[in-house]
Amino acid sequence: MPTPTKGPRLGAGPAHERLMLANLATSLFQHGRIKTTEAKAKRLRPYAEKLITLGKRGDLHARRLVLTKITDKAVVHELFTEIGPRYENRPGGYTRITKIGPRKGDNAPMAVIELVEAGPATPPAATRRAAEEEGEQTTAATSETAEQEVPAQEQAQGAEEATAAADDTAEAPAEAQESTDAKDEDSGEKK
Amino acid sequence: MAVPKRKMSRSNTRKRRSQWKASRPELVTCPRCRDYKLPHTACATCGTYNNRQVLNPS
C-alpha cells in the first residue's frame, strides 16, 4: 500500500498539489526566502531539500530528475551552480522555517521559509556558545544588509533602529544577499 | 423527519450560549523588545526570532 505523504494535503487535487509544490520550490530557489502558510512551508521543506541534495550531486541524471519537477531552466541552473555547491559541507537542513503569526484576513498561520546562510559549515558537535556566537554574527549581518546606506556607527545603537530603517531598503533583498559575504567579514573584524 | 416539539426558551438558548467563550491567547515577552508576542513565533513589533531578523515590521 502506498504510504500517504506526511503532513497536511494542501486542500487540492493531486495535480494541483504537485504544481503548487513545484512553484513554491521555484520561488524559494529564486528569492532565497518566501512567505507562505505554515502548512505549505512544512510540505515544501522536504521537497525543496531533496532537490537541493540533487543539486549538490550535480550530474546530468540529477539535473534531469530536477527538471521533471522544476520546469524553469534558469532556476535549475542556479540550483546546480550556486545553491548546490554552497551547501557542500552541510549534511541536510538547508532550509529554515520561522512562524510569523496569523494572516490578517483569514487568520491563516503564516511562516517564512528561507535557505539558510551558506557560511562556514558548523560541525555537528558544535558547542552551545559557538552556536550563539554564530547567531549573533548572522543577526549583525542581516541588520547591516538591511541598512546599507546608513553609516556603520548606528549599528551599535541596537536592532530597533535597524528595523525602522529596514523599510527603505526592503526593495533590494537580492543586492543585500550578494553583499552578505563581504559584510560577514566586516563584522568578524569588528569583533 | 424528527423535529423539535417545543420552541426553545430564551432562557435555555442563553444558558447554552453563555458557555460559548473566546479564550485568551497565551503570550510571552519578546527577549529583544519586551513586547508581547505569540510563543515560538517571530515578534511582530521588532521582527526578530531567536536573535535573527525575520521580518521588516512596518
Image: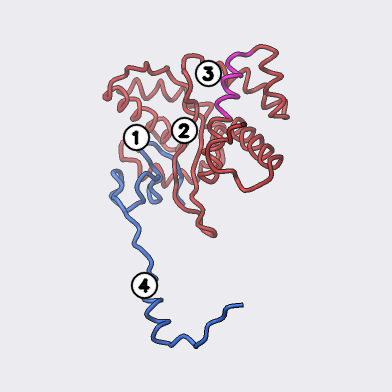
Residue B19 got which mark?
4
On the same chain: label 2 and label 4? no
- The span from disc 3 to disc 4 (Cα, nearest Å) is 56 Å
Q: Split into 4 quadrants, where in the image is the N terminus of chain A? A: top right
Amino acid on which the number 3 mark rests in the picture: Arg
Q: Secondary structure at mark 4?
A: loop
Q: Secondary structure at mark 2?
A: strand
Between marks 3 and 4 in the image, the one whose residue lies nearer the viewer: 4
Residue carrying label 3: A86
Q: How is the image coloured?
A: by chain
Q: Position of residue A135 (x, y in %)?
A: 35, 29
Q: Position of residue A164 (x, y in %)?
A: 41, 47
2 and 4 marks in contact (CB < 8 Å)? no
Q: Split into 4 quadrants, where in the image is the C terminus of chain A? A: top left
- The span from disc 2 to disc 3 (Cα, nearest Å) is 16 Å
Residue carrying label 1: A153
Mark positioned earlier in the residue sequence (1 or 3): 3
> Which tint is chain B?
blue
Q: Is residue A139 magenta?
A: no
Between marks 2 and 3 in the image, the one whose residue lies nearer the viewer: 2
- Where does the magenta region start and end? A48-58
- The span from disc 2 to disc 4 (Cα, nearest Å) is 40 Å
> Which tint is chain A?
red
At label 1, counting other C-alpha atoms closer than 10 Å, the crowd grade (few under 14, some 14-19, many 20 or more) is few
Residue carrying label 2: A96
Chain to which the residue tagged by mark 3 belongs: A
Amino acid on which the number 1 mark rests in the picture: Gln
Amino acid on which the number 2 mark rests in the picture: Arg
